[in-house]
């Protein structure tokens, strides 16, 4: 008659080396390879810091990839010390490993002793499904998706550029979207501002945008600022821990204000502008590249600075440019690819051409040639003839 | 002949053209010949002292002429000058 499973386990334990969690605790970081043989759900609930996960069900096929040198010191653990004993026997007797131990009492005893535990962050089953096409990309993957979910992106305007940018950033799982806009949805917006809808005419844009975003992706939290950005509130809005700002502003004074405040706070700004059939796009990452003032030291006079309200814009164009902005935002969050820093991209929809010019840091830039703490509140957004410019623009 | 790309805000001043061609040995020569042919562009491109307006960027191919030799930058056959004033159009309602 064959011996019982319990009897076999007793025999195995008598043949292999067992080690107390106290000894393992001292060996962590000391050259021993700590291997957790439990199931993925157990690993996800917490494990020994620095341990490698090789579930017992894949043990024989995967362990050589993790520990190729059979003379390495390997410590195995499971929940209570039984599965790791079986696995230790496999390592020693079937695979020829020379220096293998199984931790007595397993992870349960480790935790009872009060030793440190790593709890890895994981996606829910629904999130794994929702972001499955991201998870398949090596440039995003689980880690990148976590970065997106942790990210805080502030959109200045839920208008032509902000609408498509917000939609795709929400779909991508950017965890927090701030939206600054003090307008209400107007019928003439709907030709391009696709985050709003006919039923929401008259509704504040921040509320309309929030409704659409919540419907698209419940992972995304919306922080609403129903205000017009100005010198009196910009620092308060920008200081809420944003990783990236998306600039879709419609006027020069606020663009300079945003530039100066974002340089002071070190927040990258993905900036786009549109007119007619043409768009411009660049990324201003403080001190890594030029700022907006390096590119345009002073704004043009009012007659050369029309807004799209006055001059018209092809409805698709802010979609194109807003999505290029969203793409740059995601690249910055993931730290992947070549961001559009120090380059200005120009898109001409009528000729279907994209061209690019170089943008240099100005060593004499009134803002970014100085240290952030040297930029005073009073200087933010100020440029020569500011009063005259604003008077002319209205 | 060099090609000069005209931004949307200046097109009304050059008869609606998106591109012009002009001859000249330097950026200054070419822009002055544009202003001569299209007088409305004079004050848009040039400050009273004859220098470029600060709010207009001019690129020779993809490089800002200010980091080259400014208006004295020499221009070769087949080069492109890009005139680029700042645009602010964005979320306008």
Image: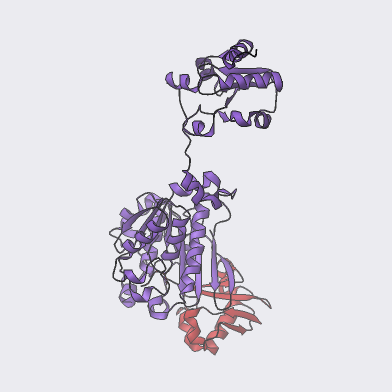
Chain colours: A purple, B red
For the N terminus of chain A, the quadrant is top right
Of the pair A364 and A15, the residue shown nearer to us? A15
Q: Which of B25 and A235 is in front in this view?
A: A235
Q: How many labels does the image show?
A: 0
Q: Is residue B46 above or below residue A273?
A: below
Q: In which quarter of the image is the C terminus of chain A?
A: bottom left
Residue A173's place in the image compared with B64, above or below, is above
The answer to whether A61 appears left or right of B29 in the picture is right
The picture places residue A193, in percent across and down from the top left corner, at 41, 69
Residue A393 visible in the shown view: yes
Q: Where is residue A248 in the image (x, y as percent from the top left)?
A: 42, 65
Camera-side residue: A392 or A213?
Answer: A213
Residue B83: % across, % down: 53, 76
Residue shown at the point (55%, 78%) measured from the top left: A350
Residue A74 lies in what quarter of the image? top right
Which residue lies most toward the top here?
A: A14
Q: Is residue A9 above or below residue A165?
A: above
The answer, for residue A376, to whether it is visible in the render is no
Question: Would residue A90 be found to the left or right of residue B10 on screen?
Answer: right
Q: Residue at x 47, y 60 (%)?
A: A168
Question: Residue B52, percent across and down?
Answer: 50, 75
């Amino acid at each position: 008659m064959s011996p019982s499973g319990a009897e076999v386990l007793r025999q195995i334990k008598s043949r292999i080396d067992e080690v107390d969690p106290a000894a393992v605790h001292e060996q962590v970081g000391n050259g021993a390879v700590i291997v957790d043989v439990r199931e993925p759900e157990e690993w996800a609930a917490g494990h020994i810091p620095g341990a490698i996960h090789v579930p017992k069900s894949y043990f024989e096929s995967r362990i050589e990839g993790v520990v190729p040198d059979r003379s390495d010191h390997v410590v195995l653990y499971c929940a209570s010390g039984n599965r790791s004993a079986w696995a230790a026997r496999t390592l020693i007797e079937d695979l020829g490993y020379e220096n293998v131990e199984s931790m007595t009492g397993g992870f349960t005893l480790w935790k009872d002793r009060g030793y440190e535990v790593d709890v890895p962050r994981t996606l829910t089953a629904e999130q794994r499904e929702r972001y499955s096409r991201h998870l398949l990309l090596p440039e995003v993957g689980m880690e990148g998706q976590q970065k997106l979910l942790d990210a805080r992106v502030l959109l200045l305007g839920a208008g032509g550029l902000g609408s498509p940018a917000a939609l795709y950033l929400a779909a991508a799982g950017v965890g927090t979207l701030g939206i600054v806009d003090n307008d209400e949805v107007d019928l003439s917006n709907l030709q391009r501002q696709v985050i709003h809808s006919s039923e929401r005419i008259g509704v504040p844009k921040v509320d309309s945008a929030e409704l659409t975003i919540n419907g698209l992706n419940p992972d995304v939290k919306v922080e609403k600022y129903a205000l017009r950005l100005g010198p009196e509130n910009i620092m308060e809005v920008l200081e809420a821990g944003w990783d990236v700002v998306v600039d879709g502003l419609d006027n020069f004074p606020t663009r300079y204000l945003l530039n100066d405040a974002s340089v002071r706070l070190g927040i990258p700004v993905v900036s786009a502008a549109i007119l007619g059939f043409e768009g411009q796009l660049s990324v201003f990452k403080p001190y890594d590249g030029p700022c907006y003032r390096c590119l345009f030291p002073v704004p043009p006079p009012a007659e050369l600075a029309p807004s799209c309200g006055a001059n018209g814009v092809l409805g698709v164009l802010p979609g194109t440019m807003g999505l290029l902005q969203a793409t740059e935002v995601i690249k910055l969050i993931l730290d992947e690819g070549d961001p559009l820093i120090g380059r200005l991209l120009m898109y001409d929809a009528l000729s279907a051409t994209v061209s690019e010019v170089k943008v240099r840091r100005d060593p004499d830039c009134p803002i970014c040639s100085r240290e952030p703490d040297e930029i005073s509140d009073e200087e933010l957004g100020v440029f020569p003839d500011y009063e005259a410019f604003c008077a002319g623009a209205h | 002949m060099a090609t000069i790309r005209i931004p949307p805000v200046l097109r009304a001043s050059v008869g609606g053209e998106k591109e012009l061609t002009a001859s000249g040995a330097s950026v200054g020569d070419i822009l002055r010949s544009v202003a001569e042919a299209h007088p409305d562009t004079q004050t848009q491109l040039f400050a009273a002292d004859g220098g470029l307006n600060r709010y207009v960027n001019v690129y020779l191919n993809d490089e800002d002429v200010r980091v080259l030799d400014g208006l004295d930058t020499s221009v070769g056959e087949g080069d492109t000058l890009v005139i680029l004033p700042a645009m602010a159009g964005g979320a306008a309602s």
